[in-house]
Amino acid sequence: MSSNKESVSIQIKKIFEENVVDDLKRFIEKRQCLNNMNMVLIYLFHIVQSAGILTTTIATGYNIREYIWIGVGLNVLASLINAFEQTNNNISKKLLQDIQSIKDGKYVDEGIVIESKKSSQKNLNTNVETNTTSNHLNEALLDDNSEELSNSV
């Protein structure tokens, strides 16, 4: 019996170790992909932003309103590209933290989401208000079922 428990324990440990190695490979691959994409986004951001500024400046100089709006639109597009770049940077930083925690032996698979006490209490209050009728309905259904079960036995 003892050897069976040890065998199961060894198999479980092996599965977790393989999972950590797979996660590490996946994190490194994702980080490399994000870094490559960010290089493209950085260059694209500067090109689009420069084109927007140039278009707006020239259009303003010649008082061509349509081109002014095209320049403004290019600047908005550049801002969106920059937002994607920043999002990728944040994801990349999180992946780097996970890689470092794997290296340090402190990695926890699939991080835990922790809500602040205020937001969880707020959610509980909202749920209590919205689920009042459904709770009464569930109680009534459970009461009816328990009577039927006791009568059938």
Image (cartoon, rainbow, N blue to C red):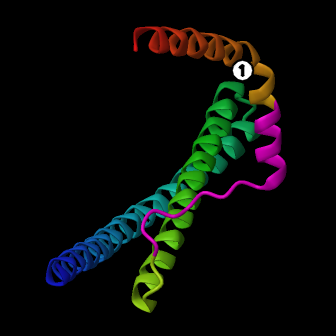
Image quarter hosting the C terminus: top left
Instruction: Give the percent coordinates (x, y) of residue 149.
Output: 45, 14
Quadrant in which residue 152 is drawn: top left
Out of 3 and 87, give the one closest to the viewer.
Answer: 3
Three-letter code, disc 1: Asn
Residue 62, given in percent of the width and then of the height, sits at 72, 35
Read off the magenta span.
108-125
Q: Is residue 57 above or below residue 87?
A: above
Picture residue at 63% right of the left edge, 35% below the top: 73
Q: Is residue 5 magenta?
A: no
Looking at the image, which is closer to me, 60 or 109?
Answer: 109
152 up-or-down from 17: above or below: above
- The correct choice, above or below, for 11 with respect to 45 in the image is below
Q: Secondary structure at mark 1?
A: loop
Question: Which quadrant of the view contains residue 127?
Answer: top right
Q: Position of residue 64 (x, y in %)?
A: 70, 28
- Please determine whether, in this image, residue 80 is positioned above or below residue 31: above
Which residue is at a point 65% across and 17% down the rendered structure image? Answer: 139
Relative to the observer, which residue lies in front, 55 or 137? 137
Q: Is residue 125 left or right of residue 138?
A: right
Residue at image mark 1: 131
Q: Could you tell me which residue is drawn at 66 percent across and 58 percent down?
A: 114
Q: Quadrant of the N terminus?
A: bottom left
Specify whether residue 122 is painted magenta: yes
Q: Quadrant of residue 17?
A: bottom left
